[in-house]
Amino acid sequence: MSKVTIRIPTPLRGHTQGADEVQVEARDVREALSALGQGREGLLAKVLGPEGELRSFVNVFVGSRDVRALAGLATPLADGDVLAIIPAVAGGGHGRA
Amino acid sequence: MGARDRLAELKARIPEVTPREALALQARGAVLVDVREADEIAQGTPPGALRLGRGFLELRIEQVLPDPQRPLVLMCGSGTRSLFAADDVARLGYRSVSSMAGGFTRWKHEGLPVEQPPSLDAAARERYSRHLLMPEIGEAGQARLMESKVLLVGAGGLGSPAAYYLAAAGVGTLGLVDHDVVERSNLQRQILHTDARVGTSKVASARQALEALNPGVKVVGHEARLGSENVERLLGGYDVVVDGSDNFATRYLVNDACVKLRIPDVNGAVYRFEGQLSVFWPARPQRPGPCYRCLYREPPPPELAPSCAEAGVLGVLPGVIGLLQATETLKLLLGLGEPLVGRLLCFDALRGRFTELAIERDPQCRYCGEGRAFPGYVDYERFCAATP
């Protein structure tokens, strides 16, 4: 098991009592997300689809690399890795076009 | 080797063409590259010639002309400097390089067509003096900005600072698309607008602010909502599009049209204390980048988008991201530096931290994947935007 940090994007912080980072222990990305979802109802449904796949409007990065360009949710993790969950954000500070 | 010997050696080695031959080659797809100084070019230059000063020639030419097979004809005042320049660009790998004998003097003497490129008057020289002082911009770069056209999608939090600085920088034409009117709650961040203009259209209000700052800029307003039926007409003809819209439906339309029209999409988004920024440009010469759909294939359904109750934004945050969008836009227009293509820059205001993430082209992307037919525009459902 590797100790990793997951960066929580603002829209999901309602599930983490406002915390912008959560530490978990996991061997790969799937385990890390599942550990993050433990006891945080509704969080994982916003990241993973019904088949357990990453949703099309959410990306997960390990370091600076998109896991889709690595081994997806099976991407192995090492101690100290930083996972970032990056959802699509549309806000433009109210520019209506 | 002395200059005279070297010149003789170049004359023996570099093919020379007459101005008439150069014109005929240009008509068949060759590029005429004028390597004279800005003050010489200001007196007249062949129409359609690429005006790259001798000083920046090697640095610039690969960005502007990525295809090494494209035939080039280099020209100067009399046909001497162009021989040296031709030798230099041939070394960069261009296969078919010639020099125009007799230069512009002979071109004019033979009565071939000449055009006057836009030049800077005394007021412009003063206004843009801090740009002119920098060799990376100089007179040629400033003239290029003045000939450039940038479309801002949204005259709100991101569009305000971006449009303000692009107008200040002298971008010749600024298009604005926004169908909203100014509300008092906008003024916490939308600095183009004023308290006195609450209730007026954002496009009209923005025009007033931008023209007051720089009367030389042409502001083209579109009080319209972007949809599949007008997106191509509104975006067509612009060099760069700056997306500062507040909803996914618009962002996907802008992306899809930019992919089809081969325009770079300088994309910024903000949410509370965080911002994201990237340049989506699959048509980038030589090093194509991903599009928005390579990053996010489809928009979230309303029930999974950030809830409206959580929405809000630190007023200064769209300022930070909007100005980075303006910076990327100026870099693209001037062909300077390394654009934020294939990179997503995330700003966390509370941590005071920028994070750069690598985003890759999706070879299966339905919109920008190699050799795919354009699948058409989609009008996604419009629902409460992430930012009020």
Image (tube, coloured by chain):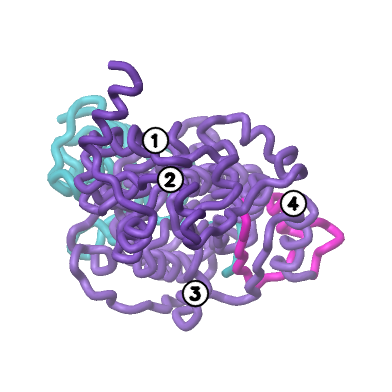
Chain colours: A cyan, B purple
Q: CA distance from mark 1 to mark 2?
A: 8 Å
Q: Position of residue B5 (x, y in %)?
A: 29, 22
Q: Position of residue B125 (x, y in %)?
A: 71, 40
The extreme right residue here reads B196
Q: CA distance from mark 4 to mark 2?
A: 37 Å
Q: Is residue B76 left or right of residue B168?
A: left
- Mark 4 and mark 2 lie on one chain; the one further toward the N terminus is 2
Say which of B10 and B300 sits in front: B10
Q: Label 1 amino acid?
A: Thr
Q: Label 2 amino acid?
A: Gly
- Mark 3 and mark 1 lie on one chain; the one further toward the N terminus is 1
From where the camera sits, is residue B347 visible? yes
- Mark 3 and mark 2 lie on one chain; the one further toward the N terminus is 2
Give yes or no for contact between labels 4 and 3 (Cβ–Cβ under 8 Å). no
Q: Position of residue B154 (x, y in %)?
A: 59, 63
Residue on which disc 1 sits: B80
Give yes or no for contact between labels 4 and 2 (Cβ–Cβ under 8 Å). no
Dot 3: element: loop
Residue on which disc 3 sits: B382
- Mark 4 and mark 1 lie on one chain; the one further toward the N terminus is 1
State the predominant SS element of the stretch in magenta. loop
Magenta range: B171-199
Which quadrant of the structure image shows residue B178? bottom right
The answer to whether tags 4 and 3 share a subunit is yes
Q: CA distance from mark 4 to mark 3?
A: 35 Å
- Mark 1 and mark 2 lie on one chain; the one further toward the N terminus is 1
Q: Position of residue B196 (x, y in %)?
A: 86, 60
Dot 4: element: loop
